[in-house]
């Protein structure tokens, strides 16, 4: 494994990408310093080295960003949908064109391998293509009232200025998944990216300007004190919507805070995805799907398979094969050749992973592969498979957000479904079975917003992404995604 700093041509490319970044906050189309000149350092989680300093927005800067968004709102709402769609289409093309640089930037600040980062650019860019196509399909209705001569007219209008708050695990896609539909619907925005990964958002905003997005439509505030910085916006009557992706804990606090202003909300929160393997499943496909569902994004994904429930007849075989696959993955600096698994985002996250593994093993689980941190710089943790995980292990209840696969077994279908639903979360579940009837029966019984049926990857810009229970509400992507940014106005017409 190569956890040392990158060198040679890749290091030169990294310097070039970092040096080309805009500095400051994007407010009303201008890049400017934070009030008082405060800055915040961004680090490479593979080495701990400082990559860049970005502006540390103060509450008055966030208010200035909302001023700009509110001022741009009427003109933007009046812009023809085709024009909004074409800006998104150009932005899609620019993201694709700049894949290499964007991927390198993301790998540097977030840690995932370059191939994962490239996959995220492709996925993230798709939201711009998809919503460029949706912008011209915002429709209303015209109907006769059932018993009178009245006519019932409904029209869709943009919600208004939105606050978009994004997490560090998908620095590009979590932003494009919100910006795409907001632009298509005609909403202006203030984007607050995660403080650990603000760089990708700055580059993204630059590319959107290049694509023709008018000044003030997208404003970006980077900050080290999220709550303090966006607090004044949450109670500002000009703000009409919050779209948040992040932890359930912060999401719940923001829902409470939003009540005063009765904001429209989209909440994409934490997960605890079960991965069910029935005895009639194609085991090769199940292992393949398990590797993707577990290891995508170093396991730091809200849709990561958090726990594996496997039919007792095939549990040993499945666990052995999964351990073989995870044990063979190349761990290293995300930008080094051949790396498949990068570091975790920080020491706090690595400690949490260690704690959950220690808890499971103290209750009888056995690490078939991995099970410990990797010494040296950076926050590396070995890909790990835990066999024989007991029902009281914390890892079955808490989001591990790391490369650890705990496996437990079941005897009956009812037992499997009950175990899958035994969580306050409800984002996604994965089901592997060769029996279509069983598959659909189980899918219907699962309390989640999404299911991967014989598939370890569900994310798709053309599909509605989102959860139920403590995983939040609202949908991103699909035909549903744009609705989150539209209000319905009804007009009673007297003929
Ligand atoms: P987080 O701590 O909740 O942070 C998410 C965002 O909220 C960051 O930008 C953060 O800023 C900001 N924030 C924190 N406290 C805030 C406050 N009081 N007011 C306003 N904003 C605040 O989550 P995270 O650790 O970055 O992300 C991991 C979590 O996101 C996991 O639980 C994962 O499951 C979830 N997630 C969900 C989805 C989904 O679609 N359902 C997708 C990806 C991730 P700072 O960076 O400054 O703290």
Image: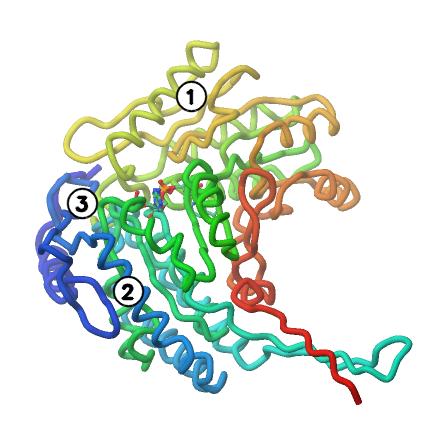
Residue at which label 3 appears:
44
Q: In terms of sequence position, does the residue under pointer 2 or pointer 3 come before the other?
A: 3
Q: Nearer the viewer, residue 349 or 297?
A: 349
Q: Position of residue 64 (x, y in %)?
A: 25, 64
Tell whether label 3 touches label 2 (CB within 8 Å): no
The answer to whether any part of residue 103 appears in the image is no
Tell whether label 1 touches label 3 (CB within 8 Å): no
Q: Using a 10 Å C-alpha cutoff, classify the residue at mark 1 as few (fewer than 14 neighbours), some (14 to 19) or many (20 or more).
A: some
Q: Nearer the viewer, residue 351 or 307?
A: 351
Image side of residue 50 versus residue 107, left or right: left
Considering only vertical position in the picture, is 440 above or below 356? Answer: below
Checking the image for residue 368, the label placed there is 1
Considering the image in quadrants, where does the C terminus appear? bottom right
- Judged by depth in the image, the label closer to the viewer, 3 or 1, is 3
Q: Position of residue 163 (x, y in %)?
A: 39, 59
Residue 369's quadrant in the figure?
top left
Residue drawn at x 29%, y 77% as measured from the top left: 215
Residue at which label 2 appears:
65
Q: Position of residue 38 (x, y in %)?
A: 11, 51
């Amino acid at each position: 494994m190569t956890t040392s700093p990158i060198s040679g041509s890749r290091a030169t490319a990294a310097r070039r990408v970092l040096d080309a970044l805009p500095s400051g906050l994007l407010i009303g189309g201008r890049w400017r310093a934070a009030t008082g000149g405060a800055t915040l350092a961004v680090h490479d989680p593979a080495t701990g080295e400082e990559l860049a300093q970005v502006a540390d927005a103060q509450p008055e800067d966030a208010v200035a960003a909302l001023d700009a968004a509110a001022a741009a709102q009427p003109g933007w709402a009046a812009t023809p949908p085709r024009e909004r769609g074409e800006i998104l289409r150009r932005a899609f093309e620019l993201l694709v064109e700049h894949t290499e640089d964007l991927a390198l930037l993301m790998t540097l600040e977030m840690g995932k391998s370059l191939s994962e980062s490239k996959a995220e650019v492709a996925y993230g860019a798709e939201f711009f293509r998809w919503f460029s196509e949706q912008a011209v399909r915002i429709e209303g209705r015209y109907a006769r009232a059932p018993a009178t001569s009245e006519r019932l007219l409904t029209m869709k209008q943009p919600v208004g200025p939105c606050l978009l708050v994004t997490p560090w695990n998908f620095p590009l896609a979590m932003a494009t998944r919100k910006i795409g539909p907001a632009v298509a619907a005609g909403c202006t925005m203030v984007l607050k990216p995660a403080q650990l990964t603000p760089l990708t958002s700055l580059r993204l905003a630059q590319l959107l300007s290049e694509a023709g997005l008018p000044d003030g439509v997208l404003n970006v505030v980077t900050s080290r004190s999220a709550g303090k910085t966006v607090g004044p916006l949450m109670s500002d009557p000009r703000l009409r919507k919050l779209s948040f992706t992040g932890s359930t804990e912060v999401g719940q606090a923001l829902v409470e805070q939003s009540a005063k202003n009765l904001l429209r909300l989209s909440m994409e929160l934490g997960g605890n995805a079960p991965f069910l393997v029935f005895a009639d499943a194609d085991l090769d496909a199940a292992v393949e799907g398990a590797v993707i569902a577990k290891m995508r994004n170093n396991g730091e994904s809200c849709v990561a398979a958090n726990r594996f429930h496997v039919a007792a007849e095939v549990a040993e075989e499945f666990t052995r094969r999964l351990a073989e696959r995870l044990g063979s993955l190349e761990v290293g600096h995300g930008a080094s050749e051949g790396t498949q698994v990068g570091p975790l985002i920080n020491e706090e996250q690595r400690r949490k992973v260690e704690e959950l593994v220690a808890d499971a093993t103290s209750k009888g689980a056995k690490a078939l592969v991995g099970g410990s941190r990797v010494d040296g710089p950076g926050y590396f943790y070995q890909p790990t498979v835990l066999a024989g995980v007991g029902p009281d292990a914390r890892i079955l209840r808490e989001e591990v957000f790391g490369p650890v696969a705990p496996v437990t077994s079941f005897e009956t279908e009812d037992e499997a479904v009950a175990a899958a639903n035994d969580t306050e979360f409800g984002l996604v579940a994965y089901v592997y079975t060769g029996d279509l009837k069983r598959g659909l029966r189980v899918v219907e019984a699962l309390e989640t917003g999404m299911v991967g049926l014989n598939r370890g990857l569900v994310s798709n810009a053309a599909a509605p992404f989102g959860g139920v229970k403590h995983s939040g509400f609202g949908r991103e992507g699909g035909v549903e995604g744009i609705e989150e940014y539209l209000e319905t106005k009804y007009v009673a017409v007297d003929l």
